[in-house]
Amino acid sequence: MKITRNPTSDPHNLRRDNRITINPFTGGRLAMLLAGMLLLSAPQSRADTLTVAVAANFAETLETLVAQFEKTSPHRVRLVRGSSGRHFAQIVNGAPFELFFSADASRPAELVARLGLPADRLRTYARGRLVLWGPGQGSAEQVEQSLRDGTFKTLAIANPRLAPYGQAAVETLQALGLGDLLENGTGRVVRGENVAQTYQYVATGNAELGFVAQSQVLAAGNSAWWLVPESLYQPIIQQLVVLQDSPAGRELLDFLATPQAAAQIEAAGYGLP
């Protein structure tokens, strides 16, 4: 009897075909599974939302910078505008802000002390500049002269207890010998909660003159404003404080430290640190 061996079952047959054939359907599923495993093992870029408290005078500038930051970052930033004093009170009472851009240096420093934060959480981001705006006047000289001569009905300033620009306005009036305007009963000075509200008093005609931030009049393209000499008031050193450290917050601060961002802050009407 002649025995014929099956070459595929003969362990000694050197011509055996060792190729593996994969079913197209199961192979596709396997490829999808492997791709999913690769995605899971790859480092993920987590997108976070920062909640940032910002003083009214810097809000417009920061909003523009944030829009640029978000174009190249997965993170998003939610800005909450208000007076520095109001934000300070909210943070002390537990408001969940991660960054606070104040219009002064005293409140951030006090928050570091109260909350037991490291000293390196403080950073100076700008130096504010005070202007006197009088849209009904023809020139900066006329605006200044109207204040010195008292030929105006109403002057708007920010609340000096809440807003550093309001405190700078008070110091300017006192340095010019016009401190009596601040006395109760004169009715010639109206106070906004912050410098944004003060600006609105003048813009709507409820005040003829107003001490506001240079950044505000530049942003709106206003004319007829007098740049108050910085010798008349204490420097408006604007600092921020990192309340909660996070990768998203560090990325935003790194962006604001770039030459491009610094140039925009200066063009907006601020001195650089």
Image (tube, rainbow, N blue to C red):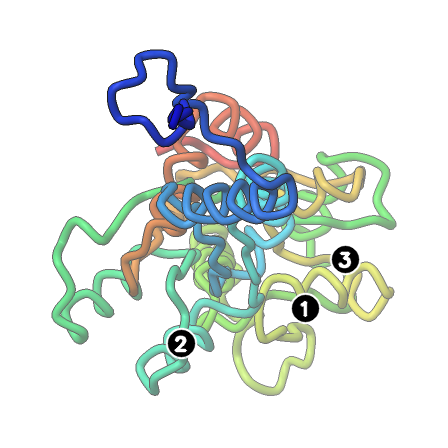
Residue under pointer 1: 197
Residue at 43 percent across and 44 percent down: it is: 252
Q: Are marks 3 and 2 in contact (CB under 8 Å)?
A: no
Helix, strand or loop at label 2? It is: loop
CA separation in Å, label 2 and label 1: 24 Å
Q: Position of residue 114 (x, y in %)?
A: 17, 75
Q: Are marks 3 and 1 in contact (CB under 8 Å)?
A: no
Residue at 52 percent across and 79 percent down: it is: 183
Q: Pick out the residue farthest to the top.
A: 15
Q: Quadrant of the N terminus?
A: top left
Residue under pointer 2: 96
Left or right, 110 with reference to 141: left
> Label 3 sits on what residue type?
Thr
Neighbours of disc 3 within 10 Å: few (<14), some (14-19), many (20+): few
Q: Position of residue 199 (x, y in %)?
A: 71, 60
CA separation in Å, label 3 and label 1: 23 Å
Left or right, 54 with reference to 99: right
Helix, strand or loop at label 3? It is: loop
Residue under pointer 3: 151
Q: Nearer the viewer, mark 3 or mark 2?
A: 2
Left or right, 80 with reference to 39: right
> Label 1 sits on what residue type?
Gln
Indicate whether 233 appears above or below 12. below
Question: Is any part of residue 238 visible from this angle?
Answer: no
